[in-house]
Amino acid sequence: MGWETGLIGACAAISASCITQPVDVLKATFFLFGEGQGTKPTWKQVVGHIYKAGGVRGFYNGISATCLRQLLFSGGRFTINDYLQSTVMKGDVGVLGKILCGATAGSLGAILSCPADLVLVRMQTDLKHAPSARRNYKHVFDGLSRIVKEEGISQWYRGVEALVMRGMFVTAGQFTTYDTTKKFLVGRLQWNKDNVGTHLTASTTAGTVSSMIVNPMDVIKSRMMASKKAADSATLKAGEKAPMHYTGNVDCILTLLRTEGPLAFYKGLTPCFCRQCPQVILMWTIFEQYKKAYAYLVPPPKK
């Protein structure tokens, strides 16, 4: 289908993300709670903190950045994955070929979406910080422009290494698991390939796999993107704590290991699973429905 696949994938991902946004905000806030202290937050603490700081709207912080991020990331990876499989490799590429195509598509999609992802993380976790340490971006484009003015355009790609690794592994795992599971259900068990039950089963498997892959990378990505320069601490009031500053991904990983232990990489696993699994299920199920609708509205030319 070419670019049409990317457009359908982007629309499906945006639709799913609008539903799962509150859980995504909760997940991102979980990643930063107890930063550098080794403390483990409870659901009640995190939910209460978000609600107290921003009310119900606080759970939808960053929705504009979410939509732009999905347009770039999911649109890019669906387009690139489809192009690699259909044009470059041609035909049934097998499991290894699917992994390679997914990894390439995910890494390139992550590079495209990094600026939007940076603003998304900052908007989602803003309420976690003290009032004087908040950035208070109005929307994604305000965030992008302010980053250029206040920190330089190079900061658009802060944390890009962790984001590329995340995009590469999660797309390879998610796309390959979904395609392989769906092929098994249709080929071996004789399920209907256009049946919602087939899509739900395949996407649930893909969501579970991707949740286990993505959590450690999301922790690192969130810590890197939410961190501030050490000089910014001068703006804080007495008694307020600044977000930690990391010199790079390696420093972030070593700091987490030293201060919070190896289990810190799976901090927020429950909200991650609660967001990632429904997100993947919704995205693939909606994708299949959008694809059928597109085929109905724009039938392929007769040969």
Image (cartoon, rainbow, N blue to C red):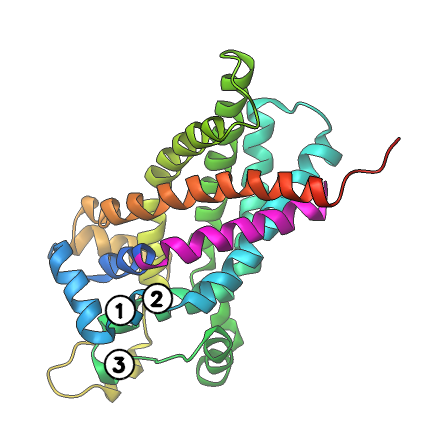
Residue 13 colored in magenta in the image: yes
Q: CB under 8 Å between callouts 1 and 2?
A: yes
As helix, strand or loop, the secondary structure at mark 1 comes to helix
Residue that carries the numbered disc 1 in the rendered image = 56
As helix, strand or loop, the secondary structure at mark 2 comes to helix
**Residue 109 appears in the picture as rendered:** no
From which residue to which does the magenta span run?
1-22
User: Residue 12 at x, y = what percent?
Assistant: 53, 49
User: Residue 220 at x, y = what percent?
Assistant: 33, 54
Q: In the rendered image of this protein, does residue 57 appear above or below residue 25?
A: below
What distance separates the C-alpha of mark 3 from that of mark 2? 20 Å
As helix, strand or loop, the secondary structure at mark 3 comes to helix
Question: Image quadrant of residue 151?
Answer: bottom left
Mark 3 vs mark 1: in front: 1
- Report the residue at 54% width, 32% height from top: 99
- Report the residue at 45% width, 50% height from top: 16
Q: In the rendered image of this protein, does residue 53 appear above or below residue 299?
A: below
Depth check: 127 or 262 in front?
A: 127
Q: Residues within 10 Å of mark 1 (few under 14, many from 20)?
A: few
Q: Residues within 10 Å of mark 3 (few under 14, many from 20)?
A: many
Mark 3 vs mark 2: in front: 2
Furthest toward the right, the residue is: 303
Name which of mark 3 and mark 2 comes first in the sequence.
2
Quadrant containing the N terminus in the rendered view: top right
The image's mark for residue 60 is 2
Residue type marked 1 = Val
16 relative to 45 in the view: left or right: right
179 relative to 213 in the view: left or right: right
Question: Image quadrant of residue 197?
Answer: top left
What distance separates the C-alpha of mark 1 from that of mark 2? 8 Å
Residue that carries the numbered disc 3 in the rendered image = 133
